[in-house]
Image: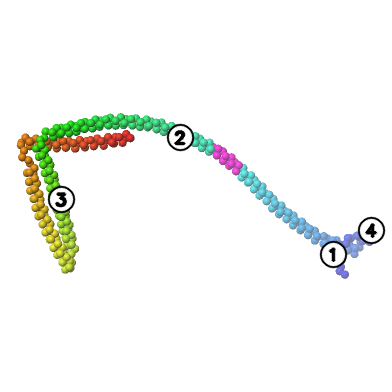
Amino acid sequence: MPARDDLNVEVPFLGGANQGEPQGRGASHHSAQNVTVVKRGGSWLHSFLILILCGAVSAMGYWGYDFLQDQQQRILLAEATEARIADLEQLLEDSRAQAKKSGQTLQQRLDEQRKLVQGQKKLMDTQYLEYQRKFSALIDNANTKQAEQLAQFNEEISKLELKVKNAQEDAQEEMGFMTSQQKTALSGLEERLVEMDALRTSVTNIEITQTKLQGAQQGVLADLAALTNDVSGGTDKSGTELAALKKGLQSLDASLEKYKGSAHASLKALAAKVSVIAKKAAPKLSAAVVSRLDKTENAIRAFDGTRAQVNKDIQRLKSKVNKIQLQLQ
């Protein structure tokens, strides 16, 4: 069997059998051993319990410190949140005050703008009425002046018409004094003048044709000069073409000379016919009749000139009257 000390069994010491007697050496030794065994077994348990208690206290201290830190952070966060809420509330109040102030300022500006617009409208209405009054006055003045000018133009037209009528009456009176012989001579003279106009037209056409031929001749000469410059260093074929062109030019010159001769002869013949017609146009009348005829012709020419001038004046005045009527409309 194992020894009692090895089993670590706690056995209480009840004392010796002889409690009243002094203990001997063996009893003292036995008591010391029992105390040592008790002390040894209790120290291990106490150490384990103390270790557990220290761990628990440490854990509780760590947990309490963490909880305290968390609580402090929550308190700080709550305080910051409350401060932020207070700032936001203050900002909201400031925004409301600023919005109210801005609304009042905007309303004030709108009122000022409305007053300004109303003032400008009144000013524009006043200016419009003033301009309308001035425009009406200008229209009335223009109508008055145009009516005066129209009356003046009508008076001038009446005077011109009267002048034309008097000139026509004078011409008719002058024509009434003409004799039958003078009328016959005048009609013959008019026929001769018509023939002379036709001859002049023919001469003019001949001159125009001659001018065109001269222009064509100059064009051919220019073409010939250009061809001469182009073929100055050419071949024998170019020389042959140049000779042919020169020959054609010579034939054209001959034709032009021939045409000039015929035209010159025609002009001489026309001049002779004109001189003959001029001689035939002069009737054999007495000096009094010739003088009377000259006076009549001068009167007719003067009447024609006066009539043409009067017609021009009438057309000019009618144009002005039409313009004035258009302006009045």
Q: Are marks 1 and 3 in contact (CB under 8 Å)?
A: no
Q: Position of residue 121 (x, y in %)?
A: 44, 33
Quarter of the image for the C terminus: give it.
top left
Q: Are marks 4 and 1 in contact (CB under 8 Å)?
A: no
Of the 4 image quadrants, the one containing the N terminus is bottom right
* Residue under the point 82% across and 60% down: 42
Front-most of residues 239 and 279: 279
| Closer to us: 254 or 22 | 254
Where is mark 2, residue-wise?
117
The percent position of residue 146, horizontal first and vertical second, equals 29, 32
Q: If you read the primary sequence from the N terminus, does the residue marked by circle 2 or circle 3 appear first?
A: 2
The residue to which callout 4 is attached is 20
CB atoms of marks 2 and 4 within 8 Å: no
Question: Disc 1 marks which residue?
Answer: 8
Q: Nearer the viewer, residue 162 or 61?
A: 162
Q: Is residue 32 left or right of residue 119?
A: right
Residue in the image at 63% along x and 46% along y: 81
Amino acid type, label 4: Gly
Name the kind of residue labelled 3 in the image: Asn
Circle 4 SS class: loop
At x 11%, y 44%, the residue is 192
Query: Mark 2, mark 3: which one is toward the viewer?
Result: 3
Name the secondary structure under disc 2.
helix
Q: CA distance from mark 2 to mark 4?
A: 133 Å
* Spatial CA span between label 2 and label 1: 116 Å
Picture disc at residue 205: 3
Task: Give the mark, 4 or 3, whose residue is nearer the N terminus.
Answer: 4
- Label 2 and label 3: CA atoms lie apart by 80 Å
